[in-house]
Image (tube, helix red, strand yellow):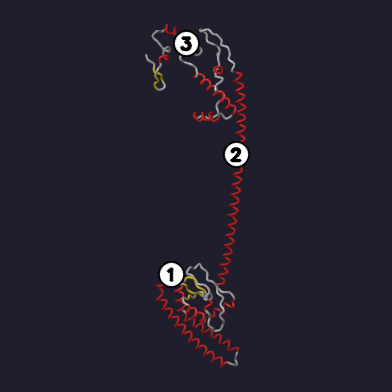
């Protein structure tokens, strides 16, 4: 015997019963485990009580069949067996009547306890007893357990179980054990799969890290090579500039003739000892200049170096001009036009005295309005 739980998912523990085929009383020691009372215990138990009368009639029929078998076997003692059977039947009827009275009294007591049991059900419910051989029986007290163990229905089922060798509860337990084993195996498989996935992820991360490290090394090597090449190019440019810094002599020309070629160069005006000439334009400044101008830098390294060289020369030229003294500089008195000979300002004034353009514009310009200089009339 064991105690049943209210939750339908919990299994009923099988019990090994040592009850003999005789009418000897069963001990309460067969009760093994307790569970909470299920919700349908009341209805099942009441149905069993109502069906008790029908069970008594079936028991009498079974007993009569057994008695008939005994009569066939012992033909010599028919009269003695008949008298004994009648006495046994009378005793059994008396016992059954007593059991029915006790059960009816228990049913009346159960109806009074239903309200208390409902409250107990909400909190978890009281503990009840259940039989592994008669699982439909739900017993509340020890007295009901004793009565059930003495009943013929329990004994008859116990004989059948001994003949068959396996109870329904044991079959359920075996099925549950198999299900548990399957669940354990599936859990182990899932754990193994998870471990494999973790190992694969770790390997992938390691590979990615190694690839990143290789890429970084390649980039560092490329940067070092570029720096070496830039240094070599800068040294070559410096050598070329030193050779070209020799100034050429000026050619004398007449005022009435246009010079055919320039008599000076940008490099001749550069300050050789300037600090900017030694430093030059860096790659960072070069790229920043193109970002400000919203232009794309040259793709090839050769074009890039040539452009840097030109910009460097222009920078030096502008810096050199800033250091010149302009206190004694006078405005231009002669203007040249493209493909035209030199024209003096005096000749133009003699031709048209009313037009005074160009001579005093730059000299008298003082204020700036927007992008224009304001010149007085």
Secondary structure type for disc 1:
helix
Residue at the image position 56 percent from the left and 23 percent from the top: 277
> Dividing the picture into quarters, in which one does residue 251 lie?
top right
Residue assigned mark 1: 121
Above-or-below relation of 158 to 351: below
Residue 354 is situated, as x and y percent measured from the top left of the image, at 38, 9
Q: For the residues marked 1 and 3, what is the alpha-carbon distance in whole angstroms? A: 119 Å
Residue 46 is situated, as x and y percent measured from the top left of the image, at 44, 76
| Disc nearer the start of the sequence (1/2) | 1
Q: Which residue is outermost to the left?
A: 377
Secondary structure type for disc 3:
strand
Q: Nearer the viewer, residue 127 or 65?
A: 127
Which mark, by number, is residue 216? 2
Q: Which residue is outermost to the top?
A: 350
Residue at the image position 57 percent from the left and 65 percent from the top: 180
Residue assigned mark 3: 334
Camera-near label (1 vs 2) is: 2
| Disc nearer the start of the sequence (3/2) | 2
Total label count?
3
Residue 99 is situated, as x and y percent measured from the top left of the image, at 47, 83
Q: For the residues marked 1 and 2, what is the alpha-carbon distance in whole angstroms? A: 70 Å
């Amino acid at each position: 015997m064991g105690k049943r739980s209210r939750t339908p998912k919990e299994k009923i523990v099988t019990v090994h019963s040592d009850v003999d085929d005789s009418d000897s009383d069963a001990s309460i020691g067969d009760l093994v485990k307790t569970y909470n009372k299920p919700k349908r215990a009341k209805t099942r138990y009441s149905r069993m009580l109502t069906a008790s009368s029908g069970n008594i009639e079936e028991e009498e029929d079974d007993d009569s069949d057994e008695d008939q078998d005994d009569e066939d076997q012992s033909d010599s003692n028919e009269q003695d067996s008949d008298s004994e059977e009648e006495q046994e039947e009378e005793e059994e009827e008396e016992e059954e009547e007593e059991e029915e009275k006790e059960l009816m009294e228990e049913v009346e007591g159960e109806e009074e306890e239903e309200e208390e049991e409902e409250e107990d059900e909400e909190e978890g419910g009281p503990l009840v007893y259940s039989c592994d051989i008669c699982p439909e029986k739900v017993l509340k007290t020890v007295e009901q357990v004793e009565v059930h163990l003495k009943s013929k229905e329990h004994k008859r089922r116990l004989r059948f179980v001994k003949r068959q060798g396996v109870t329904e509860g044991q079959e359920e337990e075996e099925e549950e054990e198999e299900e548990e084993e399957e669940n354990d195996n599936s859990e182990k498989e899932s754990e193994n799969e998870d471990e494999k996935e973790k190992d694969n992820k770790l390997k992938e991360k390691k590979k990615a890290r190694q690839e990143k490290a290789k890429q970084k090394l390649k980039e560092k090597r490329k940067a070092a090579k570029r720096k070496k090449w830039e240094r070599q190019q800068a040294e070559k440019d410096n050598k070329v500039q030193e050779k070209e810094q020799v100034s050429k002599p000026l050619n004398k020309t007449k005022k009435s003739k246009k010079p055919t070629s320039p008599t000076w160069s940008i490099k001749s005006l550069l300050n050789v000892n300037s600090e900017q000439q030694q430093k030059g334009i860096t790659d960072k400044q070069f790229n920043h200049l193109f970002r400000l101008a919203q232009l794309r830098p040259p793709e090839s390294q050769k074009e890039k170096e040539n452009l840097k060289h030109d910009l460097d020369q222009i920078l030096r030229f502008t810096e050199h001009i800033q250091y010149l003294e302009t206190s004694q500089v006078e405005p231009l008195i002669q203007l040249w036009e493209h493909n035209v000979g030199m024209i003096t300002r005096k000749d133009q004034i003699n031709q048209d005295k009313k037009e005074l353009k160009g001579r005093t514009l730059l000299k008298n310009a003082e204020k700036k309005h927007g992008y224009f200089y304001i010149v007085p009339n």
